[in-house]
Image: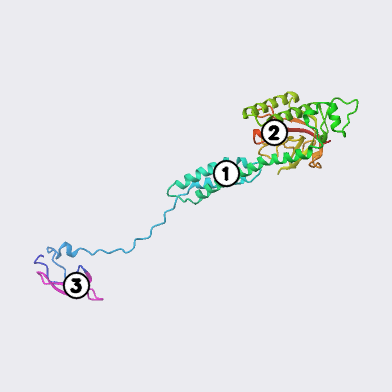
Amino acid sequence: MPDEQPSGWYPNPFDATEELFWDGRAWTGEKRPVPQPVEEVLPTPPKTAAAPVAPAAAIAAPTVAIDQAPPTAPVARSKNTLGLVALILGIVGLVFGIIPGLSFLAWIFALPAIGLGIAGLVKKGVPHGRALAGLIEGAVAMIVGIIISSVILASPSVTDASDDSAAAPTTTHVTSTASPSTSTASTPTVTPTPTAKPKTSGSAYGVYPAAEAQFVSITAKTEKALDAPDTTDLQRATLVSSRDAQLCKVTARRATNWVGKISDIGANGDGYAYVEVEIAPTMNVQTWNNDFSDAIDNTLIKPSAPFFSTLVPMKVGQKVVFSGTFLTSSKSCLEGANITQTFYGIDPNFILRFSAVRAG
């Protein structure tokens, strides 16, 4: 410490409320509180004199402990887009799954929902709630779609069996209808006039035109062959393909004044009519019954159609005479409404764009 520093009271570097005494050569150890409220004016040291400096360790300003850090703004978590998309797809898939006729499309939405749901759960740093919900929704949609589709596929066989047993006592098998004598004996209620052209009785359906009689006969023979227990899948596919080729050759894909009875009739949400006509047991011609299936084929009957008003009073079971054009598919000259090829063989529903329908 320099000798030139005058003696006096100086601030305690370790306690701001005290002062220490400097005698000109050293610190004496005397302490006193800082005078309040009058501030003590310290003598001004000569310009050449340096202020007494305590050792660096002694005069270092005490550090102020910060007990608590200032609050920081919350960090926003990023959104789980994969989870959101999975949730939406899962909901759509579930809606499709519970609608009969559309349930087989549920997997289109359910599978991506499951995949995106898993991806959303694996993704780090994002919420997983929606991803988990989407995964569950997709799985449920898949299960519900499979169950309802299976029920729909299984239901025609039960209905057909009951129809066949009920119709057996009064209906002649279509394979025997080609003979006028057999037809007349088995259906005494239908007696052709001597001047009538050769037609075949359809018993409960009316008198078949020649083309319709051949159509029914060919289809019935194919059904019988398909029912054989020793028929292989390859043989079944070949039989159905051969049947369609024969039917197209016989009819040129046209139905003119054919007869049958209505097995289903109604309207979609837009007021367009759909109709299904049974021409023989386990054989039907029909329009599609929903906009989704009919998006390309245009079979639904609009109110502007000339025969629409004729359909309005009709009910299930009524005999009708109809005309129209059979539609084609990518695999055949005819298009079927059946979901599987098996049912298209043994219980065919042929798609027809109706051009006329009247009471039979």
At numbered mark 3, what does the secondary structure look like: helix, strand or loop? strand
In the rendered image, the vertical position of residue 68 relative to residue 228, given as above or below: below
- Label 3 or label 2, whichever lies nearer to me, is 2
Identify the image quadrant of the N terminus: bottom left
User: Distance from label 3 to label 2 (Cα)?
Assistant: 113 Å
Q: What's under tag 2, amino acid-wise?
A: Ile
The mark nearer the N terminus, 1 or 2, is 1
Instruction: Write the start and end of the magenta stretch as one range.
Output: 15-41
Residue 163's x, y, as percent?
A: 75, 39
Q: Nearer the viewer, residue 307 or 289?
A: 289
In this view, the residue farthest toward the right is: 194
Q: Is residue 325 magenta?
A: no
Q: Residues within 10 Å of mark 2 (few under 14, many from 20)?
A: many
Q: What's under tag 3, amino acid-wise?
A: Glu
| Number of residue marks | 3
Q: Nearer the viewer, residue 10 or 302?
A: 302
Q: Is residue 36 magenta?
A: yes
At numbered mark 2, what does the secondary structure look like: helix, strand or loop? helix
Quarter-wise, where is residue 187 in the image? Answer: top right
Residue 183's x, y, as percent?
A: 84, 29
Quarter-wise, where is residue 6 in the image? Answer: bottom left
Q: What's under tag 1, amino acid-wise?
A: Met
- What label does residue 142 carry, if any? 1
Label 2 sits on residue: 346
Instruction: Please indicate whether residue 155 sits to the left or right of residue 188 in the image.
Output: left
Label 3 sits on residue: 19
- Label 1 or label 2, whichever lies nearer to me, is 2
